Image (cartoon, rainbow, N blue to C red):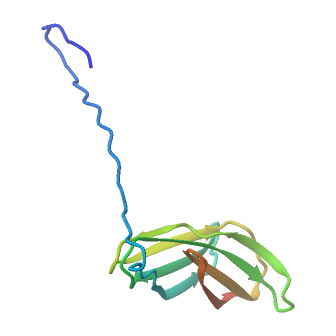
Amino acid sequence: MGTATSEEGVNVLVAGRIGALFFIQVKGTVDRSGEVTSIRLQAPEGNKPVEILSTFQNKGNVDITLGGNFLIMDAEGKVLGRGDLSKIYTFQGATESGKTQWVGRLPKGSYQVLITYDLGQGKTQVEEETLNIS
C-alpha cells in the first residue's frame, strides 16, 4: 500500500480486501418457496408518504431476493400511482421485513393497492389491500 515516515501525529493504515460470495445450487434440489406473511399499508400524514410494509418468510432451501411492484387504483380501477417495491433479501428459513414509500398525493377516499411480489424464476405472489385516506 504505502509507507509512512516516523513522525509524531496521526497515522492511518489502510488494508484493501476483495471478496466474493458464491451461491451454489445443485440441480433438482432447489426449493424456491416463501410466503408474504404480513402486509401493512400506512396512509400519508402531513408530508409523510404512503408506506407499504411487507414481511416475507423464506420457506425454501435457497436465498431469495424478493422484489416486485405495486399499483394504487381508485374505485373505478384507474391507476393513480405505481412503483417498485424495495428489495427484501432472505436466506433459507429467514423472515425479513421491508418498507417501500410512495411520495405521490391522493385525495381522501378508499383505494385498492395491488401488490405483485416477484419470488424469482417465474414465481409470483399477488396481494390486494385497501388503503383508506381520511
Residue 107: image quadrant is: bottom right
Q: Relative to 91, does residue 124 appear above or below in the rendering?
A: below
Classify 127 as above or below 29: below
x, y (%) of residue 31?
42, 82
Q: Nearer the viewer, residue 50 or 45?
A: 50
Q: Say which residue appears at 43% left-offset and 75% top-offset.
A: 97
Give the total number of marks visible in the rendering: 0
Asked if one can make out residue 48 in the rendered structure from this viewpoint, the answer is no
Q: Residue at x 37, y 62 (%)?
A: 23
Point out residue 100 in the picture as x, y percentages from the top left corner.
Answer: 57, 70
Q: Residue at x 48, y 72 (%)?
A: 98
Q: Is residue 104 above or below residue 109?
A: above
16 left or right, relative to 80:
left
Image coordinates of residue 78 in percent, x first then y, are 86, 83
Name the foreground residue: 8 vs 30. 30
* Side of 33 where 18 appears, left or right: left
